Amino acid sequence: MSIVQQLQLNDVIEPSPISAWPPAPGWWLLLVLALLMLALGIYWLIRLRRHRTYRRRALTALEKCWQVHSAREDYPGFRHAANLVLKRHCLQLGYTHTASMPAESWQKFLMKKLPPRYHSEVSSFCHLLYRPVETTQQEARDQYVKLQDWIRRLKC
């Protein structure tokens, strides 16, 4: 009799195959991070879409304002109406304090939210708001183009 027969050994038991579930903690962390990134991306897209809608509405309102005032040749009135469109746009973006801002505070706010290259234009626009200055059609048209650019460039 051999030693193997004397010991009465059993066959080797093979381990069960490795299961894919439950995943390792690193995979759970990766899943949480991916879901968080997805949620932030969706939030950012919704916010971007809302801001673009507000911008589009403000540009449309400015266009209508220009058409009405240029048809009547009321160019000083256009400046005041355009200022209201700009303030309404800021209100829609969440700057509720802009509604009742006096001219100097409004100018500082616009200078803070617009790139530095527009500061001299903002300053002249705000100074002319409450002064009875005769405006030519070309000056009003230039102001209209500047205001369109400001609405597009306004930092939110």
Image (spheres, rainbow, N blue to C red):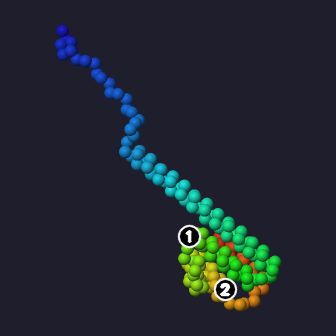
Residue 74 higher or lower than 96, as above or below:
below
Q: Which residue is mark 2?
A: 129
Looking at the image, which residue is at 60% across and 85% down? 103
Identify the secondary structure beneath mark 1.
loop
From the viewer's perspective, is 16 left or right of 123?
left
Dot placed on the residue nearer the N-terminal end, 1 or 2: 1
Q: Residue at x 59, y 77 (%)?
A: 99
Q: Is residue 86 visible?
A: yes
Instruction: From the top left corner, tell me how far across and down residue 93 is, in percent.
Output: 58, 69
Would you say 66 lies left or right of 40 here?
right
Q: Could you say where residue 145 lies in the image, as x and y percent from the top left? A: 72, 76
From the viewer's perspective, is 88 left or right of 15? right
Disc 2 marks a residue whose amino acid type is Leu
Question: Which quarter shows the C terminus?
Answer: bottom right
Q: Quadrant of the N terminus?
A: top left
Mark 1, residues whose alpha carbon is within 10 Å: few (<14), some, or many (≥20)? few
Mark 2 nearby-residue class (10 Å; few <14, some 14–19, many ≥20)? some
Residue 27 drawn above or below residue 71: above
Residue that carries the numbered disc 1 in the rendered image = 94
Q: Secondary structure at mark 2?
A: helix
Residue at (41, 44) in percent of width and height: 27
Residue most toward the front?
100
Instruction: Kindly identify the amino acid type of the residue bearing the numbered disc 1.
Output: Gly
- The label shown at residue 61 is none
Q: Nearer the viewer, residue 21 or 60?
A: 60
When asked about the image quadrant of residue 129, the answer is bottom right
The residue sitting at 69% across, 73% down in the picture is 148
- Residue 49, position as x, y percentages in the image: 61, 60
**Residue 153 showing in the rendered view:** no
Foreground residue, 99 or 10? 99
